[in-house]
Amino acid sequence: MDTVKRWLYSSSSFIPIAIVAIIGEALLNLIIIRRIPYTEIDWVAYMQESAGFMHGDWDYLNLKGDTGPCVYPAGFLYVFSVLRMVTQNGSNILLGQYMFAAFYLLLMIVLLWLYYKVIMDNNHESLVGAPKQSNRNYYLPAFWTIFLLCASRRIHSIFVLRLFNDGIAMIFVYLAILAFVYDFWTSGTILFSIALSIKMNILLFLPGLLVLYVKRFGFVRSFAQIFILVLVQVILAIPFLYTNAPGYMERAFNFGREFTFIWTVNYKFLPEDVFVSKALARGLLLGHVLTLLFFGFFRWTKEEGGPFRLILFGGNEQTKGRQMTAQHIVKTLFESNLIGIIFARSLHFQFYVWYYHQLPLLLFSMTKVPLWLKLAIMAGIEIIWNIFPSNSVTSICLTVMHIVLLIGLAFGQPLYSAYRQKATPKAKVN
């Protein structure tokens, strides 16, 4: 029994368990598609919006569907125009479901690769202050990590029963993070910008990414990466910017967009007049900014001596010229995204894919919390996201669990340094 337990928790068992998980996921998605009826929500609207683009209308103000105007950036139209052509103008729903099953498997492969890199990097002897082996295995146990990544009923539904665009955007985000982990920063920036061109929620990762840019390149050289990120957006949007630039910016990056109270999963315990009020929007924005500043000052740049020392002097003698660990890169970006999600005024059911797969790493980062409580929080979040429609009770419970998770991350003691011991060459920019 002890041998089995050690094997399930050991990082050496990650690859065989991951292979079994991918095979199981492929079979499970086929069963879901065959046995559970498809539910139409946004697919027809996606097809209508991409049809206008394919028929030569490049004015964003004219691109509409049954659910309203097109509110996604240019990359969304390119992706769903291809899907429209492959699925016979969107009429072959079954083929679309199989394609989204393939997208789901691709997402899982990238995620498993990313988590494997984090686990193996944490086991690397060159880490500064690397903990004992027992702590390593407790931090991200192989079996529980892989099981939790695959365990969500709602995520499977978002992909193969609803065909939402959110999952496709997240594939590119995780590919970008994987590139960052392997030190291919320009490639990662391009992938990140492509993800942003599919759905605007990707901006939630940006504060953490900007911190990582400064850490890896220094303050001045970071602007080259920011320029590339913006340039990709401009290139993808050229037809629409040429036709009606103000219209494109108004629709594709509408920061003032309001969501319907009835569909929200969070903050539904508030009265509707409070939910739609500008006071709540401003309060959440203030909370978002203050929380980012806290993490920026006391978590993400702590080893460098704070953000000012990082910007002015590139850190200190212990951090200059050293490569960041995979765990630090991934955790910083995941925390940045989580902060944005917690302070978002409205989360719809498809938005769950924005952060579900990040929860195992974030939960296991709460080192002072016992395993059973981590699993309980994960299960509680999953249960709430599967209760439809949401109500005030589920909304309060979700908010409380989010706050507990945020506090645990904000005040927990990290097991690992953000850097390796040995200095490394300059960042790869290919």
Image (spheres, rainbow, N blue to C red):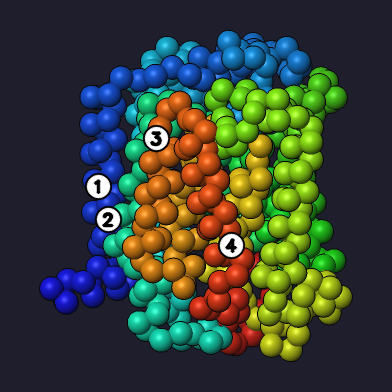
User: Disc 3 versus disc 4: distance between alpha carbons?
Assistant: 25 Å
User: Disc 3 versus disc 2: distance between alpha carbons?
Assistant: 27 Å
Mark found first going from the N terminus, 1 or 4: 1
Label 2 element class: helix
Q: Are marks 1 and 2 in contact (CB under 8 Å)?
A: yes
- Quadrant where the C terminus sits is bottom right
Q: Residues within 10 Å of mark 2 (few under 14, many from 20)?
A: few
Q: Residues within 10 Å of mark 3 (few under 14, many from 20)?
A: some
> Residue 386 got which mark?
3
User: Disc 1 versus disc 4: distance between alpha carbons?
Assistant: 37 Å
Mark found first going from the N terminus, 3 or 4: 3
Does residue 310 appear in the picture of this structure?
yes
- Quadrant where the N terminus sits is bottom left
User: Disc 1 versus disc 2: distance between alpha carbons?
Assistant: 6 Å
Q: Tell me where residue 15 appears, x and y as whole percent.
A: 30, 63
Residue under pointer 4: 407
Q: Are marks 2 and 4 in contact (CB under 8 Å)?
A: no
Residue at position x 66%, y 70% from top? 299
Q: Nearer the viewer, mark 3 or mark 1?
A: 3
Q: Nearer the viewer, mark 3 or mark 4?
A: 4
Quadrant of residue 74 in the image? top right
Q: Are marks 3 and 1 in contact (CB under 8 Å)?
A: no
> Residue 23 got which mark?
1
Q: Nearer the viewer, mark 2 or mark 4?
A: 4
Residue under pointer 2: 19
Q: Nearer the viewer, mark 1 or mark 4?
A: 4
